[in-house]
């Protein structure tokens, strides 16, 4: 691991830890499964699945937990960036809503997806705009 990657990971972990404490103190606790969850091809229960194209066409990527930033994340087995590329998605959490954001750090315009719901196209205002997502602690966020 290069020094710049290590510093980036260390900063991200520190920032997320501080953000989690702040959110918890505000009563906005979120489901957190780790600092660096890896995107893979396992679109199964308990995951968030994003697709580059509408109608759930590949490439696709699946993730467990929240993602503070899609920058530097790629669809598995491709060179295609996930950042600002999602056109369809699935929330396969049975009891958790997922909020997608246009900007990194859970900021910018938000698009809330109910638990166990999917969109074959996220719509004109959200297409190719997501840069982060937050898994809520329950299904009352939307």
Image (cartoon, grey):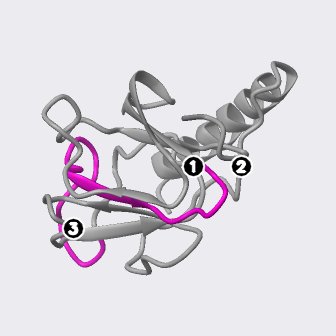
CB of mark 3 within 8 Å of CB of mark 1? no
User: Which residue corresponds to the image point at 51% horizontal and 66% vertical from the top-left?
Assistant: 92
**Does residue 22 lie above or below 68 as drawn?**
above
Badge 3 or badge 2: first in the primary sequence: 2
Badge 2 or badge 1: first in the primary sequence: 2
User: CA gap, disc 3 to disc 2?
Assistant: 25 Å
User: Which residue corresponds to the image point at 69% horizontal and 57% vertical from the top-left?
Assistant: 34
User: Which residue corresponds to the image point at 18% horizontal and 41% vertical from the top-left?
Assistant: 128
Q: Position of residue 116 (x, y in %)?
A: 51, 61
Q: Is residue 141 left or right of residue 100?
A: right
Asked which secondary structure carries label 3, the reply is loop
| Viewer-nearest of discs 3 and 1 | 3
| Viewer-nearest of discs 3 and 2 | 3
Q: Position of residue 119 (x, y in %)?
A: 29, 54
**In the rendered structure, does residue 67 fall within the stretch colored magenta?**
no
10 Å crowding of disc 2: few (<14), some (14-19), many (20+): some
Q: Is residue 60 left or right of residue 52?
A: right
Q: Is residue 71 left or right of residue 117?
A: left
Q: Which mark is residue 31?
A: 2
For the record, the magenta segment spans: 76-96
Q: Nearer the viewer, residue 101 or 16?
A: 101
Q: Nearer the viewer, residue 97 or 17?
A: 97
CB of mark 2 within 8 Å of CB of mark 1? yes
Asked which secondary structure carries label 2, the reply is loop
Residue that mark 1 sits on: 66
Q: Nearer the viewer, residue 109 or 105?
A: 109
User: CA gap, disc 2 to disc 1?
Assistant: 7 Å
Q: Which mark is residue 56?
A: 3
């Amino acid at each position: 691991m290069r020094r710049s990657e290590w510093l980036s990971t260390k900063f991200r972990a520190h920032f997320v830890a501080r953000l989690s404490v702040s959110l918890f103190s505000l009563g906005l606790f979120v489901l957190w499964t780790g600092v660096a969850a890896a995107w893979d091809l396992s679109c199964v229960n308990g995951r968030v699945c994003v697709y580059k194209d509408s109608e759930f066409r590949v490439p696709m990527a699946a993730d467990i937990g929240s993602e503070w930033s899609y920058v530097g994340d790629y669809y598995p087995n491709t060179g295609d960036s996930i950042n600002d590329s999602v056109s369809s998605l699935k929330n396969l959490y049975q009891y958790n809503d997922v909020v997608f954001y246009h900007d990194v750090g859970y900021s910018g315009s938000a698009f809330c997806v109910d638990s166990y719901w999917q969109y074959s196209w996220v719509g004109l205002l959200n297409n190719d705009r997501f840069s982060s997502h937050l898994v809520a602690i329950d299904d009352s966020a939307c």
